[in-house]
Every structure is written in structure tokens, then in C-alpha cells.
Amino acid sequence: MRSRRTVVGVMGAGEGASVEAVALAEELGECISYRGWVLLTGGRPAGVMAAASRGAARVEGHLVVGVLPDEGKGEERQTMADLDLALFTGMGKARNVINVLSADVVVICGGGGPGTASEAAHALNGGRPLILLAVPVLWREFFCSLSKGAESVSDVQECCRLIEARLTEA
């Protein structure tokens, strides 16, 4: 019997992502695919989402899922080439709940804005392990103070080891 593949959600800033967050996200996407996990992002062709997808796409056998906020009409259907599966929700930012609840583990890469913060909060509310990768100190202090389910790491290899540990515990 075939088992379901692990889904790792990577969330972070879109257009406003820092150069450092983009580099980490690309490395993280590759690390996720290398381990045979499915990468799930917000699907947009910008920032952390695009970088993680680009990194994952470099690995043979990858599966990259994008949960998009729009309805996929007209030009909206022309999504990133690095998405294997684009899920159009028509739900705007409410799609953040789908992103988080569809993931076995959620990684916030580099911080972000209110949308990314909502994904971190939904992860904790939904009982998903939350890993904060190279986020600002304020993010780390806030989310780690809310739940023991949130943990902070500074590099991609440490993040992937922590993902494996959380999956083993589940």
C-alpha cells in the first residue's frame, strides 16, 4: 500500500521579500524536494513562494503545489512554470487557511507581512508544527511565546532536520 507523501508548506513575503529570504527559500525548496516531500506555497510568482518553487523544481521527482488566491481566469491561469499543480481558490487571503491546514509542517521563511503572520497563527491554531527560519527577533519572540509548537532556526539544514524530527513525532 502506498502512503501519502509529506507536505511541507513554505510561507513568506511575496514582492517585499528580502534577498536573504529569497536565497534561503530557494535552498529550502530544493532541500524539501530532495527528501521526497511535497512543497506547498501560496503559488504566486514572487518572493519566497517563487524562490522555494524554483529550488524544488531542480530536483527530479519534485512536486510543487501552489494554492492561489484568485479564480484563475484569463491571464491568471498563466502561473509560474515551477508549479506542478496550481489550485485556484477565488478566496483571496482566506486561502491562507487552506495553505496551512494542507501542510504537515509549516515553515515561515524570513518573516513577511500580515498575510504571512496569519499563516503562522493559523499553523499554531491548527496544531501544525511551525518552524521559523531566519525570521526577525520580534517574530521569533512572539510566535514562540504563543506555543511550544513554534521553533526557530537560522539555516536550511537545521530547518530540514527539525522538519524530520517533527514528522517522526507525529
Image (tube, rainbow, N blue to C red):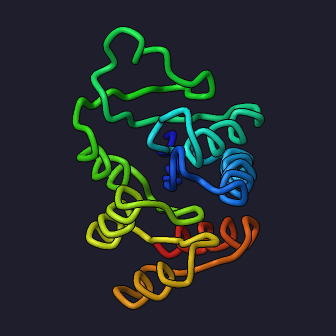
- View extreme (front): residue: 16
* Left or right: 25 as drawn, with respect to 12: right
Name the residue located 51 percent from the left edge and 56 percent from the top edge. Answer: 12
Picture layout, residue 82 above or below residue 20: above
**Where does residue 121 sit, x and y in percent of width and height?**
32, 69
- View extreme (top): residue: 74
* Left or right: 65 as drawn, with respect to 48: left
**Where does residue 14 sit, x and y in percent of width and height?**
51, 46
**Where does residue 112 sit, x and y in percent of width and height?**
48, 61
**Quick one: quadrant of the C terminus?**
bottom left
**Where does residue 74 sit, x and y in percent of width and height?**
36, 8
Total labels: the figure holds 0
Picture layout, residue 17 above or below residue 69: below
Query: Hey, which quadrant is residue 76 in on the image?
Result: top left
Picture layout, residue 57 above or below residue 76: below
Is residue 6 or residue 114 the one in the foreground?
114
Query: Hey, which quadrant is residue 149 in on the image?
Result: bottom left
Query: Hey, which quadrant is residue 61 in on the image?
Result: top right
Name the residue located 53 percent from the left edge and 81 percent from the top edge. Answer: 151
* Left or right: 30 as drawn, with respect to 114: right
Is residue 166 or residue 159 the one in the foreground?
159
Is residue 121 or residue 60 the one in the foreground?
121
Name the residue located 56 percent from the left edge and 25 percent from the top edge. Answer: 80
